[in-house]
Amino acid sequence: MAVAECIFCKIVAGSEECHELYRDETTLAFMDIHPANEGHCLVIPRAHFATVFEMPPQSFAAVAATVAKLARAVNETLRPGGLSLLQANGEIAGQTVPHVHVHVLPRRAGDNLPINWDRNRVGDPVHADAVHLAALARRIRARLE
Ligand code: AMP
Ligand code: ZN
């Protein structure tokens, strides 16, 4: 997608409206237009990155700093009981707007938002096998070097 067509770039540029919450040199926070829960808001980098994979770690760190500030403010404003931070990369992960954003999502008892998988779920047992975990950790570590 061209940056000129990106809805979040338009919000950054001021050509599309939003309920702005916070801005600094590199990040912007605003209310989500279709909140999944009361108080649902978003934090974005002001520069266009489609996914976290294109983003320098320091740019993501700046977003994370704003997320931490905003999460505290939302929590103190609404006292929802809990709050999820979510960030999707790619359609399969549920990303619908191809400009990096972190959801700051207040959670309430019984809200039944379909983002919690069963933590006791037994998926493919091969993936939980200690040998498999060790081998996978080695492969990921190699990419971090
Ligand atoms: P995702 O599905 O993770 O890509 O999340 C995209 C989010 O952006 C959704 O929660 C939408 O409701 C929200 N959204 C889309 N367009 C706008 C807009 N113009 N202003 C505020 N939020 C938006
Ligand atoms: Zn953009």
Image: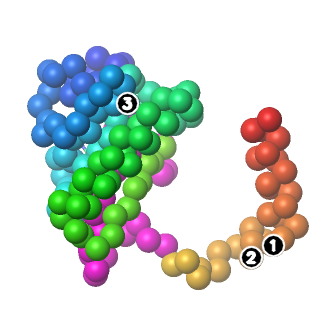
Image mark for residue 49: none
Q: Which residue is more in the foreground, 33 or 105?
A: 105
* Left/right of residue 46 with respect to residue 145 in the rendered view: left
Who's the residue at 28% across and 81% down the image?
110
Q: Position of residue 36 (x, y in %)?
A: 24, 60
Image mark for residue 125: 2
* Left/right of residue 109 with respect to residue 88 in the rendered view: left
63 relative to 102, above or below = above
Who's the residue at 37% across and 46% down the image?
67
* Left/right of residue 36 with respect to residue 133 in the rendered view: left
Q: Is residue 97 magenta?
A: yes
From where the camera sits, is residue 98 visible?
Answer: no
Displayed quadrant of residue 105: bottom left
Q: Amino acid at mark 3?
A: Pro
From where the camera sits, is residue 5 visible?
Answer: yes
Question: Colour scheme in the image?
Answer: rainbow
Q: Quadrant of ligand 1?
A: top left
Who's the residue at 24% across and 25% down the image?
12
Q: CA distance from mark 1 to mark 2?
A: 6 Å
Quadrant that contains the C terminus: top right
From the image, tell me which residue sits under label 3: 45
Image mark for residue 129: 1
Q: Position of residue 17 (x, y in %)?
A: 11, 31
Displayed quadrant of residue 25: top left
Which numbered disc, 3 or 2, marks the residue that appears first in the sequence? 3
Query: Could you say whether the residue bearing mark 3 is in a helix, strand or loop?
Result: strand
Magenta region = 90-117
Q: CA distance from mark 3 to mark 2?
A: 38 Å
Label 1 residue near ligand 1, CB within 8 Å: no
Q: Amino acid at mark 1?
A: Asp
Quadrant that contains the N terminus: top left
Query: Could you say whether the residue bearing mark 2 is in a helix, strand or loop?
Result: helix
